[in-house]
Image: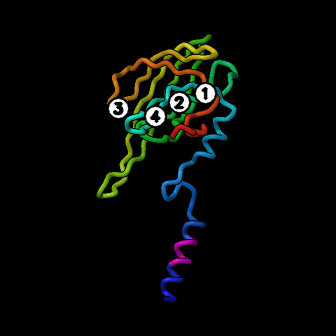
Amino acid sequence: MREVKITTVLAALLLVLRPPNSFGQSRLPDECSQTAQMDIYSDAQVSKVTGDLSGFDLALDRPSGSQRKALLFVYEGGGSEGIPLSVTVDGDNLVIEGTWVEHLREYPSKKDIVQTHRVRITGKLTQKILRGTISIEGLEIVNPESMQLKRVQKIWVCKTHSSQ
């Protein structure tokens, strides 16, 4: 009986003392606060059939000259961490590019795998829409793929989704 109590207490301590991002926890509060002051463009949606999240969110920092920074969220069934990218602005034309370093875990071996993908987005930006193309090296999407992202208030994972 005493062993069961000790095990229960240790398990409770592990849950309380776990580092951020462990046990499947995401970094949503950080991403929500980080993108709160950014311009967000999105085509993210949940499939009514499968319940999978797909599409993109693009968070652009506010204009300050010809250089801007961006975070790209790639949704392939679920949530995503932001991919930091550089933005070059020429009027309302944007070139957004960088490298996505993806950390994966292979099952059942639990071997860590690192994949890198070159990302390039070109497009024309208005107050309400970003139209252009996206190319992500090594993904099974038609490259470059046409995209039309609409201006929204928040990245998808920071919204309240009552319909789910």
Q: Position of residue 120 (x, y in %)?
A: 45, 24
Alpha carbon of mark 1 to alpha carbon of mark 2: how far? 7 Å
Q: Which mark is residue 139?
A: 3
What type is the residue that disc 4 sits on? Val
> In the rendered image, which residue does mark 4 sit on?
46
Q: Quick one: SS at disc 4? A: strand
What type is the residue that disc 3 sits on? Leu
Alpha carbon of mark 1 to alpha carbon of mark 3: how far? 23 Å
Q: Which mark is residue 57?
A: 2
- Give the residues drawn in magenta, as a range: 8-13
Disc 1 to disc 2: CB gap under 8 Å: yes
Disc 1 to disc 3: CB gap under 8 Å: no
Viewed as shown, does residue 136 lie left or right of 86?
A: left
Q: Please tell me whether mark 3 or mark 2 is closer to you in this view.
A: 2
State yes or no: residue 25 in magenta: no
Mark 1 vs 3, N-terminal side: 1
Mark 2 vs 4, N-terminal side: 4
What type is the residue that disc 1 sits on? Ile
Q: How is the image coloured?
A: rainbow
Disc 2 to disc 4: CB gap under 8 Å: no
Viewed as shown, does residue 39 lie left or right of 147?
A: right
What type is the residue that disc 2 sits on? Asp
In the image, what residue occupies the spot 46% across and 19% down?
Answer: 147
Q: Please tell me whether mark 2 or mark 4 is closer to you in this view.
A: 4
Q: Please tell me whether mark 4 or mark 1 is closer to you in this view.
A: 4
Alpha carbon of mark 4 to alpha carbon of mark 3: how far? 20 Å
In the image, what residue occupies the spot 49% across and 40% down?
Answer: 80
Q: Which mark is residue 40?
A: 1
Specify few, some or many for label 4: CA neighbours under 10 Å numbering under 14, 14-19, or 20 or more.
Answer: some
